[in-house]
Image (spheres, rainbow, N blue to C red):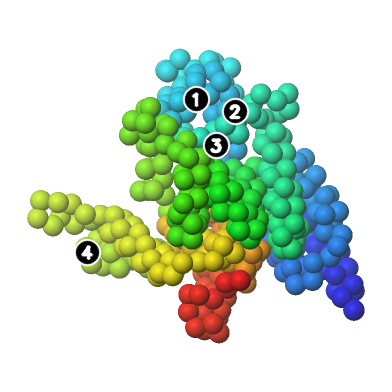
Amino acid sequence: MRTAPQIAASVLWLSSMTACFLLDDPRRRFPAYALTLLIAGVSWLILLRQPPRWAPWLGLLPHVLALLSTPAFSEDAFRYVYEGRLAWAMGPAFPFLVPPAEGPVAGVPPELFDSSWLRINHPELPTLYPPLSQLAFMLVALTPLPPLLGLQLLNMGAALGAARLLERRGLSGWVWIWLCPLVVLEGVREAHVDGLTLLFGAWATSAWLASKAGLGHAGFALSALCKLAGGLGLVVGGRRDPRALAIGAGVAAAIAWPLVVLGPSAARGGLAYAGRWQGGEGVFGLLLAGAQTMLGGDWARIGSQSFTAQQLARGALVLLFVFVMALRLRVRPEAAQVPVWTGQLLLLALLLSPTLHPWYVLGILPFAAAGAWPASAAGLALTAPLLHHASWVELMSGHWTPASWPRLVVHGVAWSALLGIWARNRGLGAGTR
């Protein structure tokens, strides 16, 4: 009875994903790109409800096509390539201290100023990527493969490993991870380091579902060593088993070495991101508008102190999230609830954040497979590529002018699903296993 819908959805998914890669320039052909992804995304939602046994084979061709493609919407991968080679030439501390733009006057070997260096986004800032990400960049630089292909293969392997780990726990890892259009495009083709968080998020999920707290904490710590947001799992897991947290804390301690060895200057890239970046925002836009109204503009002087609307809005955001997290953790979770609650907090963090890029959504997929508000997470994964609309507008007009409608669609779909879950289950506890 279920075979016919599975076959139809599989054919539709494969054909739309293939059509997506056949576009000569996804950025220039954005309307066609968005349409093919919408078809692929809807097919993916159908397959989530009825996972086919042939899912591993179904995803193979799009992943191979992704390996044969180059990044279309982001230039992050070119910074990875440069920093991996830079760390071997100048030492692993160098990317934290010297931004790419200052490389020519800082003694960086001339051969590193190639096409990758020329395409680095925000070259005036040093790295904001934690040590495990840096290590991945360095390992890729050691291989005889072209660096971009090495990064793509690394992310493809991470997606494959994540899917298998989740399948071992009876979760639909092949569909949630391997067949997710966002994983294929943002993880493999664009080679974002967020793809590595799939593997460590699935590791943590698998361990906690098996009540292996130590391994679960280690998985969260490794995720945080790739992208700092993974540290939320350590907070949730620590609420469940604070004794085993020492294992994760020992692994995560590696994240502090740049600060210990290099001092506060090593955090310059991360602090710039936390204080300046804005894009794809939802709730934060409302907080910022409220702060601007209160100050009567972008900034105001109160006594001897100057305050900006950005500072007030970001401060309010932190307080709001801490309040929600405290509410979520007011009771001690069961072991199987740890990945679910972690996914819930990560999802809320994305929806509240000043910056939401499509590839950020990858980090919640392993936890969504475990039951962390899956409808909202799937809706976010389905619509997140619309946030690339601004790149198309820039290409066509020469000006970066993000439209409001993509943000309304992305956040509207995710919040609608989330509020529906809360209404049916009466509150924040919805979605637990």
Residue 92's mark?
A: 1
Amino acid on which disc 4 is placed: Gly
Sequence order check, earlier mark of 1 and 2: 1
**Disc 4/disc 1 C-alpha distance (Å):** 45 Å
**Disc 3/disc 4 C-alpha distance (Å):** 43 Å
> Label 3: which residue?
132
Do the residues under discs 3 and 4 have CB atoms within 8 angstroms?
no
Do the residues under discs 1 and 2 have CB atoms within 8 angstroms?
yes
Above or below, 271 against 388 in this view is above
Do the residues under discs 1 and 3 have CB atoms within 8 angstroms?
no
Q: Is residue 287 left or right of residue 178?
A: left
Percent x, y for residue 204?
A: 60, 53
Give the foreground label among 4 and 1: 1
Sequence order check, earlier mark of 1 and 3: 1
Residue 138's mark?
A: 2
**Disc 1/disc 3 C-alpha distance (Å):** 11 Å
